[in-house]
Image: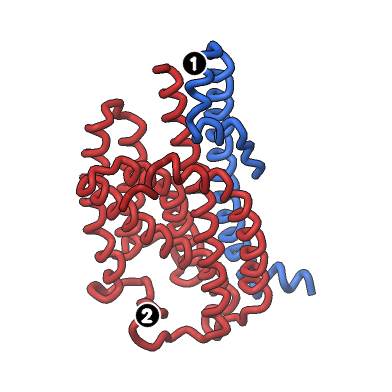
């Protein structure tokens, strides 16, 4: 079942894919930026500041999605004894961390004209900050531990502890009285966002997803070459 | 008209700084990742070049090594 997850098989695809993903990203982000900055309407309450949503929300969604994937991959790595899952998880982390930082910073910029403050220790914002710390711990663990088995154990523990925070982030706006507004987009029920704003939001989300795929592919290729470099030393 | 577009009803500073920060973060991450890739690939090529013919033949028998040598990720 996992023969397709062997690095030798994957590298044949991942070494060629980045240029196509990059080209597609440039096209999608260009359309997304035009929609977000020019064609989408301003909000009747927030005026043009609502445009920050088109970078803030996709960044937050993707950082949450990547962290969930990292946890799933780390656990799968342990269950199926497949180290390639850990390698994929490790390659996803940098873009997840950057998206998390983008979500925090753009949220802070959006907070100033909307709430009158750059920062508030609100449940949603604080839980996103905690997620950034888990990302940081995960990335630092890969850097500082030399022992391969130990680093797999430590990073998996970090992701398991961190994943507890993900539903807290999602439901923080419902569980606590927060400055942050509740979700406007619901998969299971009717969304409160107008289609003229939903469309650019989805385009920007697609562009951000393509960018994280691009970074993942480049990082994964780098990790595989690192392994092969060690292999050459052993020849 | 351009001034209006840039000012965005007085929210221009916030909107442009949010978009600029995002694009700057993307560019930085891209450049760092690309730099790491090129560094590792160059290391691989120089190590491969230092192998004697017998070892180079063994290394070349692996598909992935041939792919690394032939790939020059042009993005």
* Residue at the disc numbered 2: A187
On-image quarter of the C terminus of chain A: top left
* Residue at the disc numbered 1: B55
| In this rendering, the label closer to the viewer, 1 or 2 | 1
Q: Is mark 2 on a helix, strand or loop?
A: loop
What residue do we see at 51% from left, 14% from top? B54
Please give left or right for residue B32 compared with residue A57 in the image. Answer: right
What residue do we see at 28% from left, 30% from top? A148
Do marks 1 and 2 share a subunit? Answer: no
Chain identifier matching the blue colour in the rendered picture: B
Q: Position of residue A8 (x, y in %)?
A: 44, 39
Please give left or right for residue A54 compared with residue A162 in the image. Answer: right
Residue A183 in the image: above or below residue A21: below
- Picture quadrant where residue A84 is located: top left
- Picture quadrant where residue A44 is located: bottom right
Q: How far apart are marks 1 and 2 (CA)?
A: 56 Å
What residue do we see at 40% from left, 57% from top? A63
In this rendered view, identify the residue nearer to me: A93 or A131.
Answer: A93
Residue B70 in the image: above or below residue B30: above
Q: Is mark 1 on a helix, strand or loop?
A: helix
In this rendered view, identify the residue nearer to me: A185 or B57.
Answer: B57
**Chain for mark 2?**
A
Residue B68 in the image: above or below residue B20: above
Q: Position of residue A53 (x, y in %)?
A: 51, 70
Q: Residues within 10 Å of mark 1 (few under 14, many from 20)?
A: some
Residue A137 visible in rendering: no
Chain A, which colour?
A: red
Q: Where is residue A99 in the image (x, y as percent from the top left)?
A: 46, 55
Give the residue furthest to the top: B52
- Picture quadrant where residue A139 is located: top left
Residue A190 visible in rendering: yes
């Amino acid at each position: 079942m996992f023969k397709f997850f062997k690095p030798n098989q994957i590298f044949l695809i991942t070494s060629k894919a980045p240029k196509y993903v990059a080209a597609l990203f440039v096209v999608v982000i260009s359309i997304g930026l035009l929609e977000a900055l020019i064609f989408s309407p301003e909000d009747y309450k927030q005026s043009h500041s609502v445009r920050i949503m088109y970078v803030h929300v996709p960044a937050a969604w993707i950082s949450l999605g990547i962290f969930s994937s990292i946890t799933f991959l780390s656990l799968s790595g342990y269950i199926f004894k497949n180290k390639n899952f850990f390698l994929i998880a490790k390659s996803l982390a940098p873009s997840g961390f950057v998206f998390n930082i983008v979500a925090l910073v753009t949220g802070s910029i959006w907070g100033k004209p909307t709430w009158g403050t750059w920062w508030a220790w609100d449940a949603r914002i604080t839980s996103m900050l905690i997620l950034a710390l888990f990302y940081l711990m995960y990335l630092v663990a890969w850097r500082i531990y030399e022992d391969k088995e130990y680093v797999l154990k430590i990073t998996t523990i970090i992701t398991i502890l961190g994943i507890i925070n993900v539903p807290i982030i999602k439901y923080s706006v419902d569980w606590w009285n927060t400055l942050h507004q509740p979700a406007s987009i619901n998969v299971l029920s009717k969304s409160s966002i107008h289609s003229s704003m939903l469309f650019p939001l989805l385009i920007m989300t697609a562009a951000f997803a393509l960018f994280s795929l691009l970074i993942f592919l480049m990082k994964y290729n780098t990790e595989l070459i690192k392994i092969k470099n060690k292999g050459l030393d052993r020849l | 008209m351009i001034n209006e577009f840039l000012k965005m009803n007085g929210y221009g500073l916030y909107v442009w700084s949010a978009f600029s920060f995002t694009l700057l973060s993307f560019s930085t991450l891209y450049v760092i990742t690309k730099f790491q890739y090129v560094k590792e690939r160059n290391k691989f090529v120089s190590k491969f070049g230092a192998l004697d013919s017998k070892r180079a033949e063994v290394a070349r028998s692996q598909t992935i090594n041939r792919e690394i040598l032939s790939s020059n990720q042009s993005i």
